[in-house]
């Protein structure tokens, strides 16, 4: 009996020891699983943080590349944009410029071609557009997509107190809006002020070009599938912001500080005109030109150009020295860089002549050193009418810089307006456009997709 009890005691002890060891093993396994889970969790968190840090670095690279692009634009203007000259594309690089691991592009416009689904690269001449502060009622009415009511509202917005110009919305109209505001009754300071003008809609302001890059992007040609709503006709219907500016103005002095010659009256232009022509041209030819213009009065430099009889080559040597007004002149449109839409808004040119001017520019790019070529396209009556609105000089330029960081990660965009009136680039406006989305078209998107070198 005692022996049986001893055997039972021993068996129970062995079973109890085995059970305890099994429990410990299970606990250890659970602890190990917990540690593995924690390890995987923190490893995944660190991996996500690493990717986020890489993206932040790429964004910082893109923004620094935008800043570098802005400085490069200032350099370009300093070298090639003085005395009203428009820098030519062959004089500088405008796409896929490397800054470390990032790259930047200048989003530009081609005034002689219709927009496609691929962007044009280069600086943009602000004098190729219509100035909101000086455009006549007729010029504003000729803009595509604009309504008579919006024209009135624009005139009212820029009209100073006591100025009888225009009608449009008054202060009471603006005070009834939600939120209420006031009619500015002063010149536009930025083009984006159009969004505050009574009756202006985003469709009128931006058209189908909601990212403001002058390109027919996929979402701008798919009907109502994605915003914006468009007519899906394969052509970009741009809003009025594509054709207007508030920055175009010309100084009465050259960049070296010398005063331009006011050729409007005989008393104002002599003897400075004769001395200038004798220095730049043959003395005999200079006297022939002086006799030809005689005692005529001129309302515009374009009229003087026509009546002087100078050849395009001769006129290109002296055209930067003439004006018909003392002081700064605001709102003149450069006929060498204006698009067909803008040209069609200019009195004396209109829809009937705009396409002919664009065609002539395409066929004779070597003559665009001044606007003397207009004599081959327009009669004197048209030039006389258009003369007070046109120029062949530009002093304000915009650099729409878009940058992409390493491996296609990171994106930034900013638009800067430079004023060259004093011969050195001065920033007069800067706007971050990153939130408008991708602006470089499908080809660059493919180049810059993650894992592929953007330069290949």
Image (cartoon, rainbow, N blue to C red):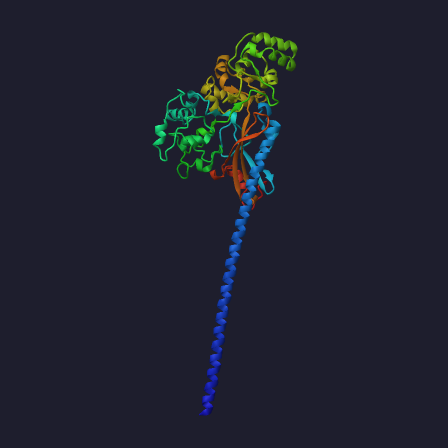
Viewer-nearest residue: 154 or 164: 164
In the picture provided, is 279 more to the left or to the right than 236?
right
Kindly identify the residue that appears in the image at 47 percent across and 84 percent down.
11
Residue 236 in view in this figure: no
Residue 195: x, y in percent? 42, 32
Residue at the extreme bottom: 1
- Placement of the C terminus among the 4 image quadrants: top right
Image height of 86 relative to 297, above or below: below
Q: Position of residue 5 (x, y in %)?
A: 45, 89
Residue at (56, 30) in percent of width and height = 426
Label count reads 0
Point out residue 116 in the picture as x, y percentages from the top left corner: 49, 32
Quadrant for residue 77, please give it.
top right
Q: Residue at x 57, y 17 (%)?
A: 322
Seen as rendered, the residue at the extreme front is 162
| 123 or 430: nearer the viewer | 430
Determine if residue 395 is in view.
yes
Q: Quadrant of the N terminus?
A: bottom left
Seen in the image, is 58 located left or right of residue 137? right
Residue at x-position 42% and y-position 20% = 138
Residue 229 picture location, percent across and down: 40, 35
Residue 202 is drawn in which quadrant? top left
Quarter occupied by residue 295:
top right
């Amino acid at each position: 009996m005692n022996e049986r009890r001893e055997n039972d005691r021993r068996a129970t002890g062995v079973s109890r020891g085995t059970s305890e060891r099994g429990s410990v093993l299970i606990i250890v396994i659970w602890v190990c699983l917990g540690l593995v889970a924690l390890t995987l969790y923190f490893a995944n968190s660190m991996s996500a943080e690493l990717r986020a840090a890489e993206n932040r670095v790429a964004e910082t690279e893109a923004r620094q590349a935008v800043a570098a692009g802005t400085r490069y634009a200032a350099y370009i203007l300093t070298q090639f944009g003085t005395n009203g000259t428009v820098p030519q594309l062959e004089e500088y690089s405008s796409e896929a410029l490397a800054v470390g691991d990032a790259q930047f592009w200048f989003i530009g416009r081609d005034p002689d071609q219709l927009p496609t689904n691929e962007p044009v690269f280069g600086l943009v001449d602000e004098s190729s557009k219509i100035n909101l502060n000086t455009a006549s009622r007729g010029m504003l009415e000729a803009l595509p997509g604009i309504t008579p009511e919006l024209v009135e509202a624009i005139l009212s917005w820029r009209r100073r107190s006591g100025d009888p110009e225009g009608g449009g919305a008054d202060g009471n109209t603006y005070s009834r809006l939600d939120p209420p505001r006031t009619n500015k009754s002063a010149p536009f300071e930025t083009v984006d002020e159009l969004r505050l003008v009574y009756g202006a809609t985003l469709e009128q302001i931006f058209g189908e070009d909601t990212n403001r890059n002058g390109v027919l992007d996929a979402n701008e040609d798919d009907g109502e599938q994605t915003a914006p709503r468009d007519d899906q006709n394969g052509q970009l219907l741009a809003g009025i912001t594509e054709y207007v500016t508030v920055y175009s103005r010309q100084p009465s002095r050259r960049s070296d500080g010398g005063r331009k010659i006011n050729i409007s009256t005989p008393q104002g232009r002599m003897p400075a005109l004769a001395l200038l022509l004798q220095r730049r041209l043959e003395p005999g030819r200079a006297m022939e030109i002086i006799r030809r213009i005689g005692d005529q009065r001129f309302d515009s430099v374009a009229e003087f150009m026509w009546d002087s009889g100078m050849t395009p080559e001769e006129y290109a040597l002296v055209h930067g020295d003439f004006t018909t007004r003392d002081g700064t002149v605001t709102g003149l449109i450069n006929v060498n860089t204006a698009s067909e839409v803008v040209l069609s808004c200019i009195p004396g040119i209109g829809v009937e002549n705009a396409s002919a001017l664009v065609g002539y520019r395409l066929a004779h790019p070597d003559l665009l050193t001044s606007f003397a070529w207009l004599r081959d396209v327009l009669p004197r009556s048209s030039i006389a009418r258009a003369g007070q609105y046109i120029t062949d000089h530009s002093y304000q330029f915009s650099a729409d810089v878009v940058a992409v960081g390493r491996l296609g990660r990171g994106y930034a965009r900013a638009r800067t307006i430079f004023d060259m009136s004093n011969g050195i680039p001065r920033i007069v406006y800067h706007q971050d456009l990153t939130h408008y989305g991708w602006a470089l078209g499908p080809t660059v998107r493919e180049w810059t997709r993650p894992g592929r070198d953007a330069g290949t």
